[in-house]
């Protein structure tokens, strides 16, 4: 139908999808003519941006067919367009296919370079935190949070008691006029004592808040340190070992095929371990956040979290600078992680809308879903750990968190973080 209406752009995109599906089902020989036609039509339609997909599909097909040089040629053509147009998607796939081509060509050094690029970009969001230090910090943080809430409630009660006591004192002062001087003296002394106690309690709350900030900062610093050690140390060594296993397998394949098969299995297990270590590293410290800023990181967070679910999503951003204060970026990113995980696990939703924008000197994150709704007050009364984590992070940034029901159903969560200078 597209060709009948002389729409070669649509025809090229559809043939690219056919090429991808044939490759996924192992029909690589059948995929080649579809990839070529897709490239031809998109070139004729002058859609350079869309060419990056059939180019990388062609690279994957030829790599699977054991023709890595052709795969590398197609991958480099598409990668040149990615660089020219500064595209991010599907940059991770390009890194992986280029590394795979070099590996199949036996150029281990080049393969290692591109695998490293792939690992830096390929962010994932498995919730893994088995570090004893982080667990201890989390326990301290929860304890201090509870103490701060108790102290705050006690302060409110004492303020109410102080007001009630003053009212009663004035009433009895009017009735017992002959005790006015003694009663007023005692009243002023008591007021002074209560004021000092209120000041002391307020200072205690402020000190606890500072301690909470220090715990969160220490937690993020420890996450960063562990993530860096995993990524720059263990992960790199494991990748080098995996490449060594692959090279050894190729060398002995003809001489000792059984041993070569065992080495291949070991290389596969090592590759899975590399992925697990990388997932842990990226969960603790997403590299996308430091490299590209908050907005692209949130978009990738949505893509990676929801790609294996039936949830649809939309992401919008407006007037947000490329980089903000590091504490603000990390705090908003962690809150978005928590909210998104709650939607996936509990909301039973079909669609998620995320908006990030600046308004009135504040950074605002709005997350809306069409799920079964969320009782905020009930969750807070039950001491939900996820909710307490969100509230504490927003509080340390001086922000406000609110949630309300959506129409006709679902939940709207809004985080508002004040910025010192929106232009920076």
Image (cartoon, grey):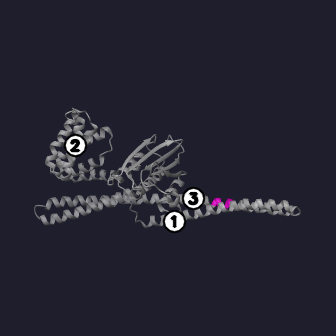
Q: CA distance from mark 2 to mark 1?
A: 54 Å
Residue 91 visible from this viewpoint: yes
Q: Residue at x 26, y 53 (%)?
A: 112
Dot 3 falls on a residue whose secondary structure is helix
Q: Residues within 10 Å of mark 2 (few under 14, many from 20)?
A: many
Q: Which residue is mark 3?
A: 209
Q: Which residue is mark 1?
A: 140
- Residue closest to the eye, 253 or 88: 88
Q: Is residue 295 left or right of residue 32?
A: right
Q: Which residues are magenta?
A: 198-203
Estimate the x, y position of residue 94 in percent, counting from the top left: 26, 47
Q: Residue at x 41, y 47 (%)?
A: 353
Question: Which quadrant is home to the N terminus?
Answer: top left
Q: Residues within 10 Å of mark 1 (few under 14, many from 20)?
A: some
Dot 1 falls on a residue whose secondary structure is helix
Estimate the x, y position of residue 248 in percent, counting from the top left: 18, 61
Q: CA distance from mark 3 to mark 1?
A: 13 Å
Q: Which residue is mark 2?
A: 16
Q: Is residue 4 left or right of residue 218?
A: left
Main structural element of the magenta stretch: helix, strand or loop?
A: helix
Estimate the x, y position of residue 54 in percent, counting from the top left: 22, 42
What is the quadrant of residue 77 in the picture? top left
């Amino acid at each position: 139908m597209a060709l009948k209406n002389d729409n070669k752009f649509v025809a090229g995109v559809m043939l690219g999808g056919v090429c991808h599906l044939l490759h996924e089902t192992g029909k690589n020989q059948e995929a080649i003519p579809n990839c070529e036609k897709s490239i031809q039509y998109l070139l004729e339609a002058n859609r350079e941006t869309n060419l990056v997909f059939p180019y990388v599909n062609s690279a994957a097909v030829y790599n699977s067919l054991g023709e890595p040089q052709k795969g590398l040629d197609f991958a480099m053509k598409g990668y040149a367009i990615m660089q020219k147009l500064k595209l991010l998607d599907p940059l991770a796939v390009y890194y992986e296919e280029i590394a795979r081509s070099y590996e199949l060509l036996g150029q281990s050094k080049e393969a290692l370079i591109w695998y490293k690029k792939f690992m830096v970009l390929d962010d994932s969001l498995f919730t893994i935190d088995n570090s004893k230090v982080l667990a201890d910090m989390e326990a301290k943080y929860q304890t201090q949070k509870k103490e701060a809430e108790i102290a705050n409630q006690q302060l409110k009660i004492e303020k109410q008691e102080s007001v009630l006591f003053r009212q009663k004192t004035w009433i009895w002062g009017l009735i017992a006029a002959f005790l006015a001087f003694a009663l007023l003296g005692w009243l002023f002394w008591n007021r002074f004592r209560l004021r000092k106690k209120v000041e002391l309690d307020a200072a205690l709350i402020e000190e606890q808040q500072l301690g909470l900030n220090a715990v969160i900062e220490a937690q993020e610093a420890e996450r960063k340190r562990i993530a860096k050690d995993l990524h720059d140390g263990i992960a790199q060594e494991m990748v080098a070992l995996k490449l060594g296993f692959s090279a050894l397998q190729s060398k002995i394949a003809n001489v000792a095929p059984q041993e070569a098969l065992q080495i291949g299995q070991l290389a596969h297990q090592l590759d899975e371990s590399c992925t697990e270590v990388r997932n842990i590293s990226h969960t603790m410290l997403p590299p996308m956040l430091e490299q590209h800023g908050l907005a692209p990181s949130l978009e990738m967070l949505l893509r990676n979290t929801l790609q294996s679910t039936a949830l649809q999503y939309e992401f919008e951003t407006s007037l947000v600078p490329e980089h903000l204060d590091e504490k603000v970026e990390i705090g908003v990113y962690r809150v978005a992680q928590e909210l998104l995980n709650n939607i996936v696990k509990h909301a039973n939703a079909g669609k998620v809308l995320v908006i990030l924008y600046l308004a009135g000197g504040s950074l605002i994150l709005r997350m809306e879903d069409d799920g079964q709704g969320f009782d905020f007050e009930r969750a807070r009364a039950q001491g939900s750990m996820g909710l307490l984590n969100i509230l504490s992070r927003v509080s340390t940034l001086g922000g406000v968190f609110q949630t309300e029901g959506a129409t006709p159903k679902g939940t709207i969560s809004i985080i508002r973080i004040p910025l010192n200078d929106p232009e920076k």
